[in-house]
Amino acid sequence: MKIKIDLFSDTKTRPSKAMLNAMVSADVGDEQAGEDPTTRTLEDKVAHLLGKEAALFVPSGTMCNQIAMAVHCKPGDEIIADKTAHIINFEAAGAAVIARAMIKPLDGINGVYTVDQAKEAIRSDFRHSPTSRMIAIEQTANLGGGTVWPLKLLQSIHGLARENNIIMHMDGARLLNAVVASGTSAANFSSTVDTVWIDLSKGLGCPVGGVLAGTKEFIREAWPWKQRLGGSMRQSGILAAAGIYALDHNIDRLEVDHANAGILAKGLAQISGINISEKTVDTNILLINVEKAKLTATQISAKLQQQGIRIGAINKNYMRAVTHLDVDKAGVIEAVDAFAKICESN
Ligand SMILES: *Cc1c(COP(=O)(O)O)cnc(C)c1O
């Protein structure tokens, strides 16, 4: 059965006609040589949006994290992150392999930890200990259910990092979702960290790419890592044009995705045996607790898929749904109806 309503992830979006048109007409050159004008425009645009001196276009968000960790850390350093972090769970142990750093997982709530937890995690200067080098936060917290880190909390953690001479890095894969949901500007969020990146291939709807930002000096150091990891490109303006289009057209509309996530949450919460996780839905990600349902998460997911609807099972008890620009309100309502029928007929 062809998938018609894909709530598996906001990575499932396809470039729109208008985005494809922008890509086709992009002015291009050799990016490795710094000669691709469209890529440079994208980098300038993102640096400006994030209030940083410079930015670098790379093929993926994962590469943004890997480059940042490699630049910031020496072998044997330690990175502090929430236990649900992408850098811990989904980057094939890149921190260990590439930066040769270890990551200390904190037991946060919904992917967000407290200043006290971060403070406790910082090592004292001791010959037997790793060196606390970097504090990483994920805005929004993906496995936490799209949770927004409030600006105040980030400012406090930033203060702590400064006092201890520790670098702060933001995995901003969905930073713009946090911006739209909270009304705090991207530059304000980014002012609490040394380095930050945004993903173009999530809610912004591009086929490829991430943009990493920081000081000019940081970007100068990031370049050899991009080259080393095979992230330098040629006529990347074709891809960068999609990014420029997305920044111009697809940020404000993230609000629609958040509203649809809200409708999904309300609808699913009516179904007996279904609980929408602990907290309200901040942005476009929804954790669905099916522990009390008669079917397991995997069974519900499989039955939905037979009807062309995709919502992934994280484990036996939890499913994750993500709204995005290729699923509209009617699609969300249809998904709720199908979900209800599956749960109620068993
Ligand atoms: C998707 C994601 C990444 C990785 O980005 P890719 O572009 O898929 O490599 C990193 N961090 C978070 C929080 C993500 O959601």
Image (spheres, rainbow, N blue to C red):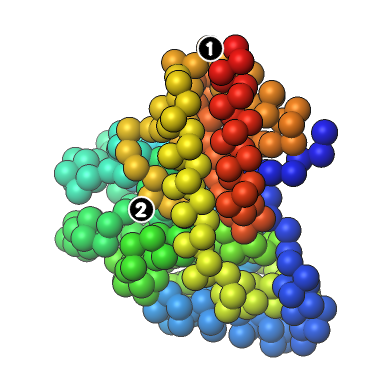
Which of 134 and 124 lies nearest the eye of the viewer?
A: 134
Instruction: Give SS at disc 1.
Output: loop
The quarter of the displayed image where residue 193 is located:
bottom left
Q: Is residue 158 visible?
A: no
Residue 116, given in percent of the width and then of the height, sits at 17, 44
In this rendering, the label closer to the viewer, 2 or 1: 1
Checking the image for residue 148, the label placed there is 2
Q: Is residue 60 above or below residue 234?
A: above
Q: Name the one closer to the observer, 71 or 318.
A: 318
In this view, 35 is above or below 227: below
Task: Say which element carries label 2.
Answer: loop
Q: In the drawing, does residue 160 fall left or right of residue 326?
A: left
Q: Earlier in the sequence, mark 2 or mark 1?
A: 2
Picture layout, residue 75 above or below residue 64: above
Q: Which residue was labeled with disc 1?
A: 294
Residue at 46% across, 82% down: 48
Labels 2 and 1 touching (C-beta < 8 A) = no
Instruction: Give residue 314's position: percent from left, percent from top.
Output: 55, 29
Instruction: Pick the residue in front: 72 or 267.
Output: 267
Q: Nearer the viewer, residue 287 or 274?
A: 274
| Residue depicted at 74% across the width and 36% down the height | 308
User: Within the image, what quadrant is residue 8 found in?
Assistant: top right
- Give the percent coordinates (x, y) of residue 246: 61, 72
